[in-house]
Amino acid sequence: MSDLKAILSGKIGAREAKSIARSDNKEELFRLLLDSDKRTSDNAAWALTHLPKAANAWFTEKQDALIDEAMLTTSTTKLRLILNLLTRTTFRRDSIRTEFLDFCFSKMLSNDPVGVKTLAIKLTHAQCLHYPELHNEFDATLQLLNAEQLPPALRCIRHRMLKINDE
């Protein structure tokens, strides 16, 4: 077992996650994100979220693997963290994956935690930007979310996305 895996297999705090992210081991962190041990993979995902903005291009290179893992994981924590990482990537028109777009649409209306739903809304929007015909579907899906019944975070992102789409 590598030293990093040993660390990530235990309980870590925010200071440790940030310290791990500052070291030069993002490839190993990424491998551990895919580890079968839930705590290890959740902690690796958490540490990856602490990488600097300069890593965004690297995350874009890993976009397909991140998408695959997001759609496969049974860990809500890991899903939220991976979706967070995916918001740091660039979605190009020629690389939009319809199964992931459908996944994001479904997560918008799911019973998942607010963090997952909020990130799904952001990711759906990022993908729909390339296809004006999808804006209507995106707007209609947002309209299904009744603003009065939403928690503040979802009400805010819903309002912001509807406003962006109206521009």
Image (cartoon, rainbow, N blue to C red):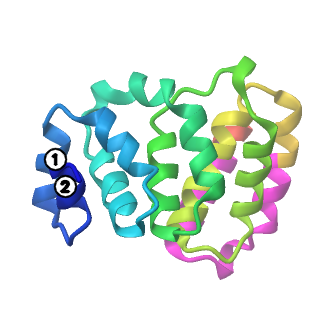
For the question of whether residue 151 can be seen, the reply is yes
Q: Is residue 75 above or below residue 1?
A: below
Q: Is residue 165 above or below residue 94?
A: below
In depth, the one of 126 and 71 nearer the eye is 71
Q: Is residue 121 left or right of residue 7?
A: right
Place of residue 151 in the rendered image (x, y in percent of width and height, measured from the top left):
55, 77
Q: Residue at x 33, y 47 (%)?
A: 49
Q: Quadrant for the C terminus, please.
A: top right
**Image position of 20 (left or right of 59):** left
Question: Which residue in the structure is indicated by mark 2?
Answer: 17
Residue 108 image-quadrant placement: bottom right
Number of numbered markers: 2
Kindly give the residue lying farthest to the bottom in the view shown. 149
> Which structural element holds mark 2?
helix
- The label on residue 20 is 1
Of helix, strand and loop, which mostly describes the magenta segment?
helix
Who's the residue at 68% across and 72% down the image?
147
